Image: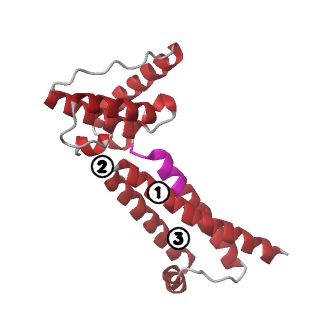
Protein backbone atom coordinates (compact mmCIF):
# COMPACT_ATOMS: atom_id res chain seq x y z
CA UNK A 1 0.00 0.00 0.00
CA UNK A 2 1.42 3.35 -1.04
CA UNK A 3 0.55 5.82 1.75
CA UNK A 4 0.91 8.79 -0.61
CA UNK A 5 -1.59 7.26 -3.02
CA UNK A 6 -4.03 6.47 -0.22
CA UNK A 7 -3.96 10.08 1.01
CA UNK A 8 -3.96 11.42 -2.54
CA UNK A 9 -0.80 13.49 -2.16
CA UNK A 10 2.54 13.65 -3.92
CA UNK A 11 5.70 12.08 -2.48
CA UNK A 12 7.20 15.53 -1.85
CA UNK A 13 4.21 16.77 0.18
CA UNK A 14 4.97 18.99 3.16
CA UNK A 15 3.98 18.14 6.72
CA UNK A 16 1.05 20.56 6.50
CA UNK A 17 -0.17 18.99 3.24
CA UNK A 18 -0.01 15.53 4.81
CA UNK A 19 -2.01 16.71 7.83
CA UNK A 20 -4.58 18.49 5.65
CA UNK A 21 -5.04 15.45 3.42
CA UNK A 22 -5.36 13.15 6.41
CA UNK A 23 -7.89 15.33 8.23
CA UNK A 24 -9.95 15.84 5.09
CA UNK A 25 -10.10 12.15 4.24
CA UNK A 26 -10.52 11.03 7.86
CA UNK A 27 -13.49 13.37 8.23
CA UNK A 28 -15.04 12.04 5.01
CA UNK A 29 -14.52 8.30 5.68
CA UNK A 30 -14.83 8.13 9.48
CA UNK A 31 -17.37 5.45 10.48
CA UNK A 32 -19.06 7.87 12.90
CA UNK A 33 -19.87 10.08 9.90
CA UNK A 34 -21.23 7.22 7.79
CA UNK A 35 -17.93 6.35 6.12
CA UNK A 36 -16.41 2.96 5.43
CA UNK A 37 -14.48 1.59 8.43
CA UNK A 38 -12.00 -0.33 6.28
CA UNK A 39 -11.20 2.71 4.12
CA UNK A 40 -10.77 4.80 7.28
CA UNK A 41 -8.29 2.23 8.65
CA UNK A 42 -6.30 2.43 5.40
CA UNK A 43 -6.19 6.22 5.65
CA UNK A 44 -5.11 6.09 9.29
CA UNK A 45 -2.41 3.50 8.56
CA UNK A 46 -1.11 5.57 5.65
CA UNK A 47 -0.95 8.67 7.83
CA UNK A 48 0.86 6.78 10.59
CA UNK A 49 3.43 5.51 8.09
CA UNK A 50 4.06 9.01 6.76
CA UNK A 51 4.13 10.58 10.21
CA UNK A 52 6.77 8.08 11.34
CA UNK A 53 8.88 8.62 8.24
CA UNK A 54 8.61 12.43 8.30
CA UNK A 55 8.23 12.95 12.06
CA UNK A 56 4.90 14.67 11.64
CA UNK A 57 3.10 15.30 14.90
CA UNK A 58 -0.38 13.81 14.93
CA UNK A 59 -3.18 16.28 14.25
CA UNK A 60 -5.65 17.09 16.96
CA UNK A 61 -8.96 15.51 16.00
CA UNK A 62 -12.26 17.25 16.61
CA UNK A 63 -13.67 16.43 20.04
CA UNK A 64 -16.40 13.87 19.51
CA UNK A 65 -19.73 13.99 21.31
CA UNK A 66 -20.34 11.55 24.20
CA UNK A 67 -22.43 9.39 21.86
CA UNK A 68 -19.64 9.30 19.28
CA UNK A 69 -17.10 8.46 22.01
CA UNK A 70 -19.29 5.56 23.19
CA UNK A 71 -19.69 4.34 19.60
CA UNK A 72 -15.94 4.60 19.02
CA UNK A 73 -15.26 2.75 22.28
CA UNK A 74 -17.62 -0.06 21.24
CA UNK A 75 -16.05 -0.20 17.78
CA UNK A 76 -12.56 -0.32 19.31
CA UNK A 77 -13.59 -3.14 21.63
CA UNK A 78 -15.21 -5.02 18.74
CA UNK A 79 -12.08 -4.50 16.61
CA UNK A 80 -9.87 -5.76 19.45
CA UNK A 81 -12.09 -8.82 19.94
CA UNK A 82 -12.13 -9.53 16.21
CA UNK A 83 -8.36 -9.07 16.04
CA UNK A 84 -7.89 -11.51 18.94
CA UNK A 85 -10.15 -14.06 17.27
CA UNK A 86 -8.45 -13.68 13.90
CA UNK A 87 -5.07 -14.31 15.54
CA UNK A 88 -6.48 -17.56 16.86
CA UNK A 89 -7.54 -18.73 13.41
CA UNK A 90 -11.01 -17.20 13.12
CA UNK A 91 -10.24 -15.49 9.83
CA UNK A 92 -13.92 -15.53 8.83
CA UNK A 93 -14.66 -13.00 11.59
CA UNK A 94 -12.35 -10.36 10.15
CA UNK A 95 -14.08 -7.39 8.60
CA UNK A 96 -13.74 -7.28 4.84
CA UNK A 97 -13.31 -4.01 3.04
CA UNK A 98 -16.38 -2.59 1.30
CA UNK A 99 -18.85 -4.83 3.10
CA UNK A 100 -21.82 -2.60 2.31
CA UNK A 101 -21.12 -2.43 -1.42
CA UNK A 102 -20.36 -6.14 -1.61
CA UNK A 103 -23.57 -7.02 0.24
CA UNK A 104 -25.66 -4.90 -2.14
CA UNK A 105 -23.94 -6.45 -5.15
CA UNK A 106 -24.64 -9.98 -3.91
CA UNK A 107 -28.26 -9.14 -3.02
CA UNK A 108 -29.00 -7.64 -6.43
CA UNK A 109 -27.48 -10.68 -8.16
CA UNK A 110 -29.55 -13.08 -6.05
CA UNK A 111 -32.67 -11.11 -7.02
CA UNK A 112 -31.55 -11.43 -10.64
CA UNK A 113 -31.47 -15.23 -10.22
CA UNK A 114 -34.99 -15.20 -8.75
CA UNK A 115 -36.34 -13.07 -11.62
CA UNK A 116 -34.51 -15.22 -14.17
CA UNK A 117 -36.11 -18.34 -12.69
CA UNK A 118 -39.58 -16.77 -12.94
CA UNK A 119 -38.99 -15.78 -16.56
CA UNK A 120 -37.58 -19.18 -17.53
CA UNK A 121 -40.65 -20.87 -16.06
CA UNK A 122 -42.73 -18.67 -18.39
CA UNK A 123 -40.79 -19.94 -21.44
CA UNK A 124 -38.48 -16.94 -21.76
CA UNK A 125 -34.86 -17.35 -22.79
CA UNK A 126 -31.73 -16.20 -20.97
CA UNK A 127 -30.46 -13.05 -22.71
CA UNK A 128 -26.84 -13.60 -21.67
CA UNK A 129 -25.50 -15.96 -24.38
CA UNK A 130 -22.91 -17.59 -22.11
CA UNK A 131 -25.42 -18.12 -19.29
CA UNK A 132 -27.93 -19.44 -21.85
CA UNK A 133 -25.38 -21.96 -23.14
CA UNK A 134 -24.73 -23.13 -19.57
CA UNK A 135 -28.50 -23.34 -19.04
CA UNK A 136 -29.00 -25.46 -22.16
CA UNK A 137 -26.22 -27.93 -21.22
CA UNK A 138 -26.49 -28.03 -17.42
CA UNK A 139 -29.99 -26.79 -16.59
CA UNK A 140 -31.02 -24.15 -14.11
CA UNK A 141 -28.73 -25.46 -11.36
CA UNK A 142 -25.73 -25.17 -13.66
CA UNK A 143 -26.71 -21.62 -14.53
CA UNK A 144 -27.03 -20.75 -10.83
CA UNK A 145 -23.51 -22.09 -10.24
CA UNK A 146 -22.22 -20.14 -13.25
CA UNK A 147 -23.82 -16.86 -12.17
CA UNK A 148 -22.76 -17.23 -8.53
CA UNK A 149 -19.21 -18.02 -9.65
CA UNK A 150 -19.28 -14.81 -11.70
CA UNK A 151 -20.48 -12.86 -8.65
CA UNK A 152 -17.74 -14.43 -6.53
CA UNK A 153 -15.13 -13.49 -9.15
CA UNK A 154 -16.24 -9.83 -9.14
CA UNK A 155 -16.32 -9.72 -5.33
CA UNK A 156 -12.81 -11.20 -5.06
CA UNK A 157 -11.52 -8.83 -7.76
CA UNK A 158 -12.99 -5.89 -5.84
CA UNK A 159 -11.30 -7.04 -2.62
CA UNK A 160 -7.96 -7.32 -4.40
CA UNK A 161 -8.38 -3.91 -6.04
CA UNK A 162 -9.36 -2.45 -2.64
CA UNK A 163 -5.90 -3.24 -1.27
CA UNK A 164 -4.44 -0.76 -3.77
CA UNK A 165 -7.32 1.65 -4.39
CA UNK A 166 -10.43 1.41 -2.20
CA UNK A 167 -12.22 4.06 -4.24
CA UNK A 168 -11.81 2.14 -7.51
CA UNK A 169 -13.03 -1.06 -5.86
CA UNK A 170 -16.05 0.76 -4.45
CA UNK A 171 -16.89 2.18 -7.90
CA UNK A 172 -16.50 -1.27 -9.46
CA UNK A 173 -19.05 -2.75 -7.08
CA UNK A 174 -21.50 0.16 -7.47
CA UNK A 175 -21.13 -0.07 -11.26
CA UNK A 176 -21.91 -3.79 -11.05
CA UNK A 177 -24.94 -2.99 -8.87
CA UNK A 178 -26.15 -0.45 -11.45
CA UNK A 179 -25.75 -2.84 -14.39
CA UNK A 180 -27.46 -5.78 -12.68
CA UNK A 181 -30.06 -3.37 -11.25
CA UNK A 182 -30.93 -2.26 -14.79
CA UNK A 183 -31.31 -5.94 -15.76
CA UNK A 184 -33.59 -6.40 -12.73
CA UNK A 185 -35.82 -3.52 -13.80
CA UNK A 186 -36.02 -4.97 -17.32
CA UNK A 187 -36.79 -8.44 -15.94
CA UNK A 188 -39.49 -7.03 -13.66
CA UNK A 189 -41.14 -5.35 -16.65
CA UNK A 190 -41.01 -8.61 -18.61
CA UNK A 191 -42.58 -10.46 -15.69
CA UNK A 192 -45.28 -7.79 -15.49
CA UNK A 193 -46.00 -8.04 -19.24
CA UNK A 194 -46.06 -11.84 -19.16
CA UNK A 195 -48.55 -11.77 -16.28
CA UNK A 196 -51.01 -9.61 -18.21
Instruction: Please name the residue that numbered disc 1 is placed on.
Output: 173
How many other residues sit within 10 Å of disc 2, few (<14), some (14-19) or many (≥20)?
some
User: Farthest right residue?
Assistant: 196
Left or right: where 185 falls relative to 3 = right
- Residue contact at pointers 2 and 1, CB within 8 angstroms: no
Left or right: where 166 falls relative to 67 = left
Instruction: Please name the residue that numbered disc 2 is placed on.
Output: 163
How many other residues sit within 10 Å of disc 3, few (<14), some (14-19) or many (≥20)?
many
Which secondary structure class fits the magenta region best? helix
Q: Position of residue 120 (x, y in %)?
A: 66, 78
Quote the CA–CA distance across marks 2 and 3: 29 Å
Eyeballing the image, is 70 above or below 109? above
Eyeballing the image, is 120 above or below 77? below
User: For residue 100: magenta?
Assistant: yes
Disc 3 on helix, strand or loop? helix
| Quarter of the view holding residue 89 | top left
Label whose residue precedes the other's in the sequence (2 or 1) = 2
Quote the CA–CA distance across marks 1 and 3: 20 Å
User: Which segment is the magenta one?
Assistant: 96-105
In the image, 38 versus 12, the foreground residue is: 12
| Quarter of the view holding residue 192 | bottom right
Q: Residue at x 52, y 75 (%)?
A: 143
Q: Is residue 85 visible?
A: no
Instruction: Please name the residue that numbered disc 3 is placed on.
Output: 144
In the image, 84 versus 171, the foreground residue is: 171
Q: Is residue 72 visible?
A: yes
Label whose residue precedes the other's in the sequence (1 or 3) = 3
Amino acid sequence: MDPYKVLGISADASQQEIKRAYLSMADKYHPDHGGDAWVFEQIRTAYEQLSQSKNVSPPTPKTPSPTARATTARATTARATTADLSKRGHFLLRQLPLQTETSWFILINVLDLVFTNILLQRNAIEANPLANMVFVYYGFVGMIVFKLASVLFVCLAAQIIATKSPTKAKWLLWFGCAVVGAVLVYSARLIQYSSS
